[in-house]
Amino acid sequence: MFHSAANSVIRLVFTPVLLLFYLIYSGAAIPVIAPVFVVILFTLMPSRPQLKVLLKLLVVLLLISFGIVTLGNLLIGTPTGFLLFTWSLMFLSYYRGHQDPKDIIANLTLVIVIFMVVMKQQMSIPLSALPWTLFESFIIAVLATYLGFWLFPGDEANIPPDETSIEGADKNMGKIVFKATATSIVLYALIWAGSSQALLIAITFGSMIKSPITKDSHTFGYHRLITTSVGILFTIPCMLLTSVNAPTFVIIGVTIFSGLQLACFAIRRKTHLTIYQLLFTNFIVLTYQIVNNPSVLSLSSQMVRLASIVAAISIGVLTINLLKSEPKNTH
């Protein structure tokens, strides 16, 4: 409808932010899920998908959400069985991610598993209540994504893809096992420690290490550390306004403005797809936590969140460096 060279940035900022505030103030059960799905869909589908593609995604998500939660509910009585089950799903997600970093099923599976474990183990939400919540959130996300492409048409041309390819990506099974194991350890350690930022840290860490790396991992990891650490500072204006009880429309406007600045920052840094997605996933989750915690302690809470993300990013960088591929000897 509105044609502009900046449409790809506008729809990525406006759609999930407006959807998040709408779901928060309309009393949705878990309002942050659908906007996170919107970010994933926008970053993995740079141009408007056909309606049949979105319908296929709905079917896949139906199978994922009900299948994961149904099997998980059967195994929840045995901690070892549930742990192995969630580990196997993370392994599948990372395996598919190594085959194709833009695999939507791989990305959705990782996020859903993290949501499922945190909600069950830390928030004590019954697994039986999650399938419809996840499916409903995905339906909302698909509709919002399609609306975003209709209102702001145009392909994503500003964000380069990850520097990986099917031929060049490392498919070493040991490294995929290591990634799944590391993510499981981080997730369950956070839950065991009672961390209030378990969801945010787990998503950040899991996203940091999901893509295979074919170039120098030290430089790649350092770039991720700097870009993502600076990127999370764009949520501070929203936090300050929330702490002084500013009007809702002012908070929404400043949040959208900050999101646009974040996108410009990512483009100037020539950020690749994985980090672009991670920046906006963190931006949405942090905004949700800020708006959901409008207290005088919001500044200290925000500092804890920022420190948690930096810690997750640092651990992710260390993991990436541990997984560094050694050059093959050609002699």
Image (spheres, rainbow, N blue to C red):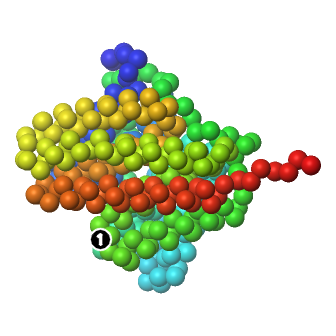
Using the image, determine if residue 79 lies above or below residue 277. below
Residue at 38% x, 29% y is 264
In this view, which residue lies farthest toward the top?
3
- Regarding mark 1 in the picture, which secondary structure is present there? loop
Q: Position of residue 3 (x, y in %)?
A: 36, 15
The answer to whether 136 appears left or right of 188 in the picture is: left
Residue at 38% x, 77% y is 192
Q: Position of residue 82 (x, y in %)?
A: 49, 76
Residue at 44% x, 68% y is 187
In this view, which residue lies farthest toward the bottom?
78
Displayed quadrant of residue 303: bottom left
Using the image, determine if residue 80 lies above or below residue 298. below
Closest to the observer: 317 or 104? 317
Q: Quadrant of the N terminus?
A: top left
**Is disc 1 surrounded by few (<14), some (14 to 19) or many (20+) residues within 10 Å?**
few
Displayed quadrant of residue 21: top left
The answer to whether 8 appears left or right of 196 in the picture is: right
In this view, which residue lies farthest toward the right?
331
Does residue 331 show up?
Answer: yes
Q: Position of residue 51 (x, y in %)?
A: 46, 33
Q: Which residue is mark 1?
A: 123
The answer to whether 95 appears left or right of 131 in the picture is: right
Q: Position of residue 64 (x, y in %)?
A: 48, 57
Closest to the observer: 128 or 176? 176
Residue at 53% x, 55% y is 317
Callout 1, which amino acid? Met
Closest to the observer: 76 or 91? 91
The answer to whether 166 appears left or right of 266 in the picture is: right
Does residue 22 show up?
Answer: no
